[in-house]
Image (spheres, rainbow, N blue to C red):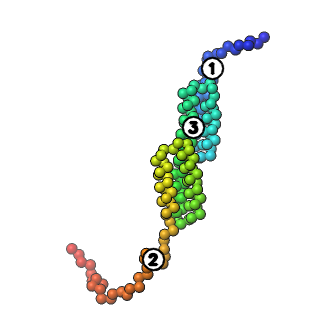
Amino acid sequence: MFSATKQKDPEAERRLIEALKARCDAQIHQLAGMAEKAETTSAERAAQRLIEQAKNPKLPSDYRKYAMDEAQKLECAANIKATDMAVHRAMAAALADDKETRDKEVAKIRQFMQKAISLRAPADFRVGTEKSLENILLSGGVKHTGPTKAKPLDTAPKNEKHAKDGLPAMVR
């Protein structure tokens, strides 16, 4: 009744591969949108789904490698963008002397930076982010209303008979 050997239809196999590629391409497009918006958690989930779809043995090996590389690159891009946005928020908080917000954003910067580095972010990304972190941590909290050791209170008496007092400015 049933044959032990199935006849493989090459046309059906080709359509199946094209459908798998179309699903992977749609997932890549969705992941690119998430990377653009710096949605790291949803980008991580989407990258995992894409990797799972790409592991299908029916896909050609070159396309499988392409899909997995794209998943990693786009997830890394999402983390780089999230790091950059956190750097800007932390710098604004540091300049406004809001230490609590600054510290929260610095923690986010470190988290996103480590994730991006684990996803093979460029080497200059790490250097630039560390310099930005240093600037953030050194910014803010330097406005003094009174005298300081570097700028003590001026207690010297004013010279009433100074030559420049009361004279009009010389015009050439």
The answer to which image quadrant residue 44 occupies is: top right
Q: Which residue is mark 1?
A: 13
Per the image, label 1 sits on a secondary structure element best described as helix
Question: Which numbered disc flags the more N-terminal residue, 2 or 1?
Answer: 1
Left or right of 125? Residue 31 is right
Per the image, label 2 sits on a secondary structure element best described as loop
| Name of the residue lying farthest toward the left | 172
Work out whether 64 lies above or below 77. Answer: above
| Name of the residue lying farthest toward the top | 1
Q: Which residue is mark 2?
A: 149
Residue 81 horizontal/vertical position (percent): 53, 48
Work out whether 53 lies above or below 43. Answer: above
* Separation of residues labelled 2 and 1 (CA atoms): 81 Å
What residue is at 56 percent from the left and 53 percent from the top?
Answer: 110
The three-letter code of the residue at mark 2 reads Lys
What residue is at 45 percent from the left and 77 percent from the top?
Answer: 149
Of the pair 132 and 41, the residue shown nearer to us: 132
What residue is at 64 percent from the left and 16 percent from the top?
Answer: 9
